[in-house]
Amino acid sequence: MQPCVSQSLGIIHPIVLEKGLNSEVWDSNGKRYIDFVGGIGVLNLGHCHPAITAAAKSQIDKLIHSAFNAVPHQGYLDIAEALQSFIPVGYALSCMLTNSGAEATENALKISRAATGKQAVIAFDGGFHGRTLAALNLNGKVNPYKVGIGTLPGPVYHIPFPSPDNGASTSEAIQALDRLFEVEISSDEIACIIVEPVQGEGGFRVLDHVFAKHLRKVCDERGIVLIMDEIQSGFGRTGTRFAFTHLGIEPDLLLMGKSMASGLPLAAVAGRESLMSVLPKGGLGGTYSGNAVACAAAKVVMEVMSDANLSQWSNAQESLLLETHDRWKRSQRFPMLGPITGIGSMRGIVFEDTVNATAAEHLAALLIAARQAGVLLMPSGRKRNVLRLLPPLTISQEHLSEGLSKIERALGTLQT
């Protein structure tokens, strides 16, 4: 990458994209790829969805921006109203729009502190909530996010993330939570607990539903705000609008972003009306938050993401991913392949050490070989040993099969 770009930016694929259409992208040399990265979960509806690009182009001709705090615009109001119906909770909702998921996280912390009069936060091992200063401390991974930064805003306490995908049990997590309250800090000082229903950066691991219900009960009994971070798992990635519905509970605050506006910068915090209005006027907001063009795109996103479409897309994708992974495992050709994680079309494949290479080395080699074969992939997991699969929900079965075939071909080049 050019020296005029900060070398602190981590680049996975040293190519430059120029064009994209649904699941296909082309680089500056004209080479075509099947895109399984999707802007890291931003493009659930693919590159340049025609209805979304039409809405954005139309909006540009009418109003590009108005800072909502100064002069409201209709697009912001339309999204706030649409979220009332789109988010499946049984209480009255209120929201604020932001530019990014990290900004949504920061504002959720402000709201929780103001609502409870408390400061401490509980987060989870393997979690990821952003790269801004307060969000950094929530992340359940040091390298590279917290290295060289010094003291971070807190206090923040981490406990194990119980999941069928990582072997950490519900009883282990409950014991860790109980110990935290007995040894480290009183629950009376905890403002909020923040958790991903399905960890993204952590390796596409699903939160145990029994523990989720326990967490909801603890928060209710002890006056703690439960924040669910659906920045990556939301907007259809798991086959439903939001992944928390798989757990049978409702959050107090919900964080959204990434695929909310299909590539335009828009995110949000939504939650109980009593929480969202606790700060004084002017306590929430931002110059670009709820940009009119991004709002126009987001409105169409929610229209396209009907329950029927989400179910159909997820079922088709999940079926082929599971079938392909099972075939790869049964063939015994790829000893570095471990289990598949996640739910719906939010899937990861764990890589394991072999005699000649570590899991992370295998995955790093696969990313290069797959790119050469014509498919773009992304790593995840604390040890960068989980392949995350994020093709658009709208990908055709033909292109999904083509992408998986290219991955299989690339796997065959790896040293075992």
Image (cartoon, rainbow, N blue to C red):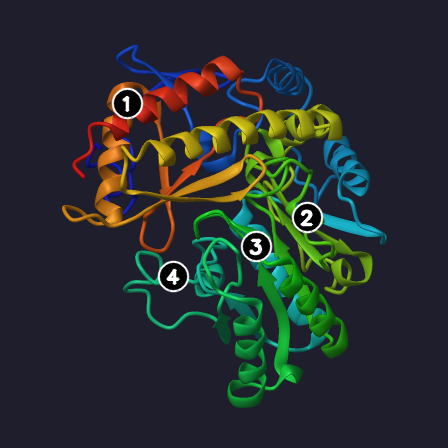
State yes or no: discs 4 and 1 in contact (Cβ < 8 Å): no
- Which of pointers 4 and 1 indicates the residue nearer the eye? 1
Return the residue at label 4. Answer: 141
Residue 12 appears in the figure: yes
Q: What residue type is labelled 1?
A: Arg
Q: Distance between the residues labelled 3 and 2?
A: 12 Å
Quadrant that contains the C terminus: top left
Q: Residues within 10 Å of mark 2 (few under 14, many from 20)?
A: some
Q: Is mark 4 on a helix, strand or loop?
A: loop
Q: Distance between the residues labelled 4 and 1?
A: 32 Å
Circles 1 and 2, Cβ within 8 Å, touching? The answer is no
Q: Which of marks 3 and 4 is nearer the N terminus?
A: 4
The residue that disc 1 covers is 409
In this view, the residue farthest toward the top is 30
Query: What amino acid does circle 4 point to?
Result: Lys
Amino acid tagged 3: Glu
